[in-house]
Structures are given as structure tokens and as C-alpha cells.
Amino acid sequence: MNLNEIYTEIIAEHSTSSRNRHPLEEASIKLEGKNPSCGDEIVLELLIKEERIEDAAFTGSGCAISQASTSMMIDLIKGKTVMEARQLAELFSAMIHKRVSDESQLAPLEEAAALQNISNLPARVKCAVMPWRTLEAATEKQPLE
Amino acid sequence: MNLNEIYTEIIAEHSTSSRNRHPLEEASIKLEGKNPSCGDEIVLELLIKEERIEDAAFTGSGCAISQASTSMMIDLIKGKTVMEARQLAELFSAMIHKRVSDESQLAPLEEAAALQNISNLPARVKCAVMPWRTLEAATEKQPLE
Amino acid sequence: MQRNYAEDFPILKNSTSNGKRLVYLDNAATTQKPASVINAIRDYYESSNANPHRGAYPLSERATELYEGARQRVADFLNAAGPDEILFTKGTTEALNFVASSFAMDIVNEGDEILISIAEHHSNLIPWQMVAKAKGASLKYLYTDAKGELTEEELDAKISPRTKIIAVAHVSNVLGIVNPIEKIVGRARQVGAAVVLDIAQSLPHMKVDLQALDVDFAAFSGHKLYAPMGIGVLYGKRQHLSKMRPMLYGGGMVEDVSQQEAVFLEAPYTFEGGTQNVEGAVGLHAAIDYLMGIGYDEIKGIEDELSLYVVEGLLNNPHVILYGNSHPHNRTGILSFNIEGVHPHDVSTILAADGVAIRSGHHCAHPLMRHLGVNATCRASLSFYNTKEDIDIFIESISKVRRWLRLESK
Amino acid sequence: MQRNYAEDFPILKNSTSNGKRLVYLDNAATTQKPASVINAIRDYYESSNANPHRGAYPLSERATELYEGARQRVADFLNAAGPDEILFTKGTTEALNFVASSFAMDIVNEGDEILISIAEHHSNLIPWQMVAKAKGASLKYLYTDAKGELTEEELDAKISPRTKIIAVAHVSNVLGIVNPIEKIVGRARQVGAAVVLDIAQSLPHMKVDLQALDVDFAAFSGHKLYAPMGIGVLYGKRQHLSKMRPMLYGGGMVEDVSQQEAVFLEAPYTFEGGTQNVEGAVGLHAAIDYLMGIGYDEIKGIEDELSLYVVEGLLNNPHVILYGNSHPHNRTGILSFNIEGVHPHDVSTILAADGVAIRSGHHCAHPLMRHLGVNATCRASLSFYNTKEDIDIFIESISKVRRWLRLESK
Ligand SMILES: Cc1ncc(COP(=O)(O)O)c(C=O)c1O
Ligand SMILES: Cc1ncc(COP(=O)(O)O)c(C=O)c1O
């Protein structure tokens, strides 16, 4: 394990960045996600209009990996359709569980692909995955009007 | 372990002998003894008069060791006082648990000293001891008039 | 030529018993361990030991992988629907007690019936007495016939719409008889009863496919399957496990704990409170790998042949009384017998002098002893590591027993 | 010169972690095993393995002697009144659950109080929640002060005539604080409460004399005492054990069983249903022998010195927040801390890259975490086999954490 591949600039930056870290007043969905064994906790808020994620933000606390993963996810899904966002969550999960490792296939994840190396740290996989699972849960019953 | 020292003539003889194996009509005390884990079971009957064991007999079934030990014990205690019988039980127990091994000290046990080698068979010690424990229990509350 | 599997077992190669070669015929009590299992334990402690599930460092990750890998191996081995149906326990006894206290106590009501066989081991018997008493239910018995078998008539007579639980051994630890599980499960399904299967004595000798058998619970002990002591398995169908209360409350099985409340994890973790026995799981994994390297066909082939050979030897002795079936069809290599006029404990002491280890007593099956009309029996139980030479020594030793007790002229 | 005890532990000599020497500082979670314990396990399986208590052949007699010899060794080690007060369990969690379900459930009534400390491990906490709920009793908490200690005022305020049970850890697994057991027992005696002592974290580091402490029950796990996994001990005073219901129903704990009734043996056998873990008992015996060969004076001497050295190193770092006492008086070598601005899980991942194994999380003590006002902490826990070099590597690694997270300029 090489820490340079885990605690990269971009992950460190996202983990403390305040850009996406705030409540979302007009949110249409709000869901809590947590890793009870770690104490990671986020509240994910989404503003969905006509099957599209118009805005997204989060509050909460946790380890650098979970916070960076949440922030990167929000950057990525803003403006995407619910369907696209769920497909990205699917892809992220495939990456972190080592089912997909090909760089070109991971391109749609953009910056979030920086979390690929977490797949080598079994104890931290759940930190990276948590926000994406929360996204999936939040959009599961989303009526696709 | 040498079986010659365990299944001796005298033990084999006592284990099947019918001399002491019968009910005792005038018994003043009757007590059941058993080794639940083996299925050894005897009923020891004693006729005690003025602190003296006038007669004794047993019924029951079990392994050769337990049956021989019972029969030898009865031969030995007949005619002895209750106190003497209890002292012999004490001595027998000391022999079987290897606290006394000196031959001259074991002389009062007479034929029952033939069971000394059972002390080398931890799994069978309880078979040899069972009748003696029953004797102790039977005479425990015996009023020494 | 057939391989001599005793070579794989250090204790069989090196140990003597009373100065003689050890002839170990008490395999139903516990089995010896192959070098591969002993080495797996050592390797675990020399390279991977840590508390699993809790640490974010490589050693703990490795311990977790080994532990969960063993769970997956057991699930595959038994053909469970998934690893979440496999709980590690310390043995069959703990597993069966847990089913009784956490499953049965919730579904059995006054007037219901719990049905077990008269041949059950105390571990699959006393827990049911307790449930029956606590719930005002009745504990009924399936009786074995003269050959030690459970007949269809007996099943028909005893399984009723009031039956809530049927708990039976796959193979009897006294008679070696294989019970008709398919028939029992078939009838159980008709009346809506749950089936609890004790596979402690079957799994070491035959393939057990739990999905094919369609039982609700199954339990076995590692130490009877060439694995270390202190580890066992409870299999439970997901639909049941998801409703059951935890077994032990403590670390590793909770999601959140406040001063007055606790929220528990899901199966299998909710049932594994406290630090788990990774060593035992690793040893069990190694034992299953070892056995599957040999294969059940080979195991059964060897054991059936030996079993026939023992029966032949025993029946050649006019003073031997054999209990249960005498042919290996429908029976594993467990043989219960007595010698006329001799108490079983004397038999085992006399055999021990020749280096032969057999069991004598009630084999934790008092009710069966009474049903057979005996106080105790001798039991020889085989493994594929036994040899014809072992059996020759055993039979020869048996032939001397009555002479030692002066019941025959020399 | 002081001996380097790491030499006795194969995993510490041979293992690397991420290519670096393993610096194992998670001893409160589980300890590594000395070669003498690993060899004792191997020797047991290679020369003495059998089902104890049941066989009349030498191998089984030997297994029985080893098992009962281990019980006697534990009784002497803890200064119990006799071996019949020592029950083998699979660990602390099983032992404490058993006291809760088999002792407490019988003596606690509606309106009674059960008192535990806020620093208890979940294993000594959730079982008491269950008893309190089942019985309509109330579960009260002793709160620790700013130093992590239980003050006399707190004891006076909480121990009342309604207190039936006081269950506390001898040493906290998060703060390492040694609780004032003499004072607690003194007050418990005045109000007639029973004291249950969790010695899982004290016994590895200090002499525990149970008759001198005069507690009613005590429990520990072998795996935290350099012994194998899967074995633990419950100590109980004779007067209590003689009245308690069995733990598991099955083989080995009965005198007689009929179809509807069972008669049980006396303590300790009535509490040990099922085949017992002889390997675990043998390993525990070897571990106690190993520890006593070193002696508690030496162990405490080394661990206190290392502990001071760690504290010094940690406090030199302005971003470290240390919880509980900072001097080793009244504390074993367990150190909980946080690094400003960094989540504990990131700390342990970063340390793992340097081969350092520490624990991060809630340490199975959620209520204490809330009491301390944190989500989680980092915990380094020492053993006498650690060295100053281990600590140097640990402290150096700690100093790099904030830089990795870009919280400091390089
Ligand atoms: C103080 C304390 N009590 C109880 C336990 C539970 O022990 P185990 O998990 O071995 O059952 C632990 C450790 O996990 C502990 O540190
Ligand atoms: C059929 C059967 N069931 C249950 C048990 C109990 O297993 P354990 O003692 O390993 O818990 C045994 C063996 O002792 C057995 O043979």
C-alpha cells in the first residue's frame, strides 16, 4: 500500500472543501447515510426536477475518504438525470469492489476515479461507498414522472 | 498397564461370586450406590447391632471392578464395628487415590488390596470406590448408640 | 494400491498407547487432526493473527478475510443459499441449544408437539425437554425398530398437524443408522413443521446438501470433522435467521448502543457477539479442504469396506451381540455391541491394554440405551484413516476379553 | 540489559506489514501468541487429542488430565477457592451473558437497580440492558470524571439499597483506567449487591486475586492473555454456582436422562455441556505458565516505562488530544487519543502504511464515546513485548498524519 495513492491532493482537497457542504433549502429529497462502525454520517440533499438533479449538497462528518467521496459524487451528479446518476453509482460500486478496473471504462466517474485505490483497503471500502449507497437509496423511490 | 495386575484371579473370582450377592432380609440399613456415567448400580444392605456390622450383602450389576470391589468390601467388614469399617473405607480411598501405597500399611484391607493397581486407571477409579462411598454414606447417620 | 491416510495424521504415526501402536476407533467421539490442519493453526498464529472485523491495518484485514473465507467455504461445502446462512458456534451443542432457545421458544405454543427420535444425542434432546416444559408443549418420540431404523409407519403415526418442530440426527451416534431425512422433511412440509437436523455424525462420512434436503436448521462440530476443537456451525434458513433474537450480546453484533437501547446488525453478524474464533474457522477451512482433496467417494469406499470387515470379525465371535443393522447399507462405520457376561467398561479397559481406543458407556444417549434394553454398550467408530490391520488388532483383542474375566477356559 | 520478549513471538519476528516490520499496538483487541503456546497446541494434537471425561483408554485419560490440569492452573492463578469455581467458556462475552441470563435473571426483580459504569465494553453492557428490560429493573450508570475515574462521591451517589448487581470492568478497554474495585465491593457488601468483574483487560497486566477482591463473578478471554482464541473463563463463587441453571444442555453435564426429565451434574460440570475445548484449555495453561515465567513485576515494569514514553511522545505533538489520565499510576498501557482535524480511521490507515497496527473506532463502547463527546478515538495498547523502537516508529508516524491530509504545510 502506498499512501500517495490513497491520500492524494484531490482527495485531501475534497475532504475539507466546503463547496458542496451546506444545507439545501429547496431540496426535494433528504436522506441520512451512515457507517455505524466508523461514525461516518452524512445528510445528502437533492433537488430533483423532471428526472434531473438540479442541485445537490451535504452536511455531516466522517473520515477523509467518506467526505471526499461525497463531495466528488455531488460534483459529478449535479445536472445529470436520476438515471445517469444511478448508473454512475453502479459504476463506482463496480470499481471499488474491483469488478471494473479498466481506466477508460472508469472515465465517466471523472475525479471520483481517484478513489480507485481504496479498493485495496478492505476496511475502508465502506467509507468510500457510503455516499453512493445513500444516493441509490434516496433515488430508489423517486417517481420518474 | 499390565492387565495381569488388573484382572487378577481374585478380582475375577469376586466379580462373579454369588457369596455376598443376595438380599438381606433383616437388614437395618439399605442404600443404593451408583456411577451414573457407567451404569454401575448396587444396593448395599447392612445389619448393624450395637455398633457392629453383623451381616452385609448386596445386589446389583456393573463392571467387574465395581462388583469385585463390593464383594471384597463385604467380606472385610462383616463382624467389624462401624468405626472400623469406616476407617477401612478411608484407607481404601487413600490407596486408590495413591495417598498410601506402602504394602504394610495396606495390610488391613486384606484381599481388597488387590485393587491397588486400579489407581493407575483414572477412568476406573470411580468403579472401585463406589461401594466404599456407599458404605460411608450408609453409616454416616448411623446412631452410635 | 490404496493410500494409507494414517500417514497424514501425526498422532497416528507417532503415538503409542500402552507401548503399542495406537488403534484409534473412537472417531465418533472426536477425530484426529491431519498435519495440514495443525499447520494451518500454526501458520495462522505465526502470520495472520488479529481481531477480525475491527482493524484498519493489514493483519486485521487478513484475519477478517480468513474468517469470512472459511464461512464461504462452509456455505459451499453444505450448499447453503449463501454465507449469511452460516453461523460459527463452539460446537453442535451450542448450535442446537441456540435453535431451541431463540427459534423454538418463539414458535412453539401450549399444546404443540415437538418430535425427536429416541436415538438422539443428549444435545438434541435435553434442549427440547426444556422448550416443551417452558411452553407447555409435549415432547414426543419416534421409536426405532429392531434394526435401529425409523419406519414410514412410525413417521405417519407421530407427525401430526400439532407437530411444530422435528429434530433428528442425520446419523445416529450409537447405531450409525442414516435416518430417512427426505421422508421426514416431506411430511414436515405437509404439516408445516420445521426440521432441525443434527449432522454431527453424517458430515464426516457423506455429502450433505442442505438445499436439496431442504431442512430449516443444521448443526455440526469441527472436532468430529478433523478440525480443531472449539468451533462448530449452525446453518439456518435466511427466513428464520432474520427473525431470531441474538445468541450473545456484546461486541461485534451491534449497529448502535445508547445507555438504554441497542440496535443489532443483521445475520450472520448479529449472532456472533464477542471476539470470534478465527483459529477455529481457519482450521475448519483446512479440514474441509483436506477432506475434499480425498473426496467422499473414496472416504465412503474405504469406510464401508472396513465396516464390513469389522462386522464379519465381530459376528465370528459367538459372544458378541451387535445392535442395529449389520450391513453397511444405510449405515456409517459406527458399531455398537456387547460381549455376553462382560460390562462394556471392562471391554474398553482390556482393549486399551492392546492399544485399542474404543468408547464404552451410554454415548450421551440414555433414552436409546433404555429402548435397547441395555445399561451401556461398546462402540467402535471408524474413519478412512483406519486400516484392516487396525481391525485385526481390535478383533483379536475382543476375542481375549472373556478369558481375562475367567468366563472361558484359556 | 532487558530481554527483548518479542523474540518469543514468531509473528513479531517474522511478519512484515506493508513491507515494514510489524509494530503491533492493538494488544487490547487481541494479543499475539508466544512460540510456547503455539507449540503446546501442536503437541496436544500430535500426542494427546481425545474427547475428555468419557474414554477409558490412555489418550482420553490424558486429555482429561490436561483439561482438568488447566482448570486447576487457572484456579491457582486467580486464587479461586477451588477449581470447581472455574468454568471454561469461549470468551468474556459468553461468560458475562451467562451471568446475566442464569444468575441475574433469578435475583433481579421489578424496581431493582443494576449498576454499571459508562466505560463498560458492550459485552458488559448490553446483557444488563436485557436483564433490566426483562425484569422491569432500572439500569443505572456510574459516570467517570474528567480523568476517566470513578470517584467516591459517584459511588456513594449511585450505590443504593435497591442495587442488586454492580458490573464493572477492572480496567477500561478504552482509557486503561484501573477502577477502585475494593471500594466498590465494600459498598456492595453494605447493600447486599453482587459484584461482577470484567477482568479481560486487567489480567494481562496485573495480578488479580479473586478471593482478596471478594467479587462474586469474574470473566476473561484467553485470546487477550497470549492464549488461543475460542477459550475464556468464568469464575463464580461456589454459593452462586450451586444455584444456577446450566448454560448449555447436552452431553457431559447430566447424571441421568429419561424421555421427559434430566438430572444434572454439579458445578463446574453442569455448566460445560458439549465436548469441551481441550486445545484451548491447554493453550491457556501454556500462556499462564509463560506469563508467570516472566512475572507481573517485570511485565508491569516494562509496560509502565513504555507507557510513559508513549505519553511523552504524544504530548509533544500539539495536535494530539489524549483522553483519560496521562500518568501510568492507576492505568495500564492503553492510550486513547485523537489528532485535531483528522478522523481516527484515517489515522490508522496512515499508520498502517508504516507497519503500525492501532485500533480506531468506538472500541465497543458507544456510551463512553458519547460521554467523552467524540465519535471515535484512536487507541494504542501496549504489551511487554513492545519496545521503545516500536514507540519511536509509532510517534514518528503520528507526526506525519496531518501532513498527509494537507492540514499542515510539509
Ligand atoms: C473490557 C472488555 N470486556 C469484554 C470484552 C469482550 O471479550 P471477547 O470479545 O473476547 O468476548 C473485551 C474485549 O473485546 C474487553 O476489552
Ligand atoms: C449426533 C451428535 N449430536 C451432537 C453431538 C454433540 O456435539 P458436541 O459435543 O461437539 O457439541 C454429538 C457428539 O458429541 C453427536 O454425536
Image (tube, coloured by chain):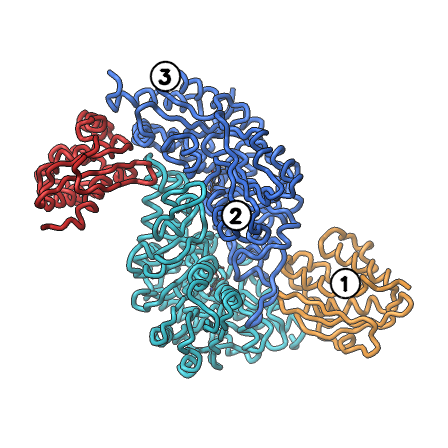
Chain colours: A red, B orange, C cyan, D blue
Task: Kindly identify the residue that appears in the image at 53 percent across and 43 percent down.
Answer: D284
Distance between the alpha carbons at the discs numbered 1 and 2: 36 Å
C-alpha gap between disc 3 and disc 1: 75 Å
Q: Secondary structure at mark 1?
A: helix
Q: Nearer the viewer, residue D18 or B71?
A: D18
Residue B137's tag is: 1
| Numbered marks: total | 3
The amino acid marked with disc number 3 is: Pro
Residue B96: quarter of image: bottom right
Mark 3, other Cα within 10 Å: few <14 / some 14–19 / many ≥20: few
Residue C165 position (above or below residue C157): above
Residue C212 is marked as: none
Residue D318's label in the rendered image is 3
Give the image location of residue C331, x and y in percent.
Answer: 41, 73
List the single residue furthest toward the front: A26
Q: Which amino acid type is marked by label 1?
A: Ala
Would residue B35 appear left or right of D32 to someone viewing this image? right
- Name the outermost residue toward the bottom: C153
Identify the subunit bearing mark 3: D
Which label number is shown at residue D95? 2
- Residue D73 appears in the rendering: no
Label 1 CB sits under 8 Å from any ligand 2 atom: no
Q: Earlier in the sequence, mark 2 or mark 3?
A: 2
Residues tagged by mark 3 and mark 1 found on one chain of the structure: no
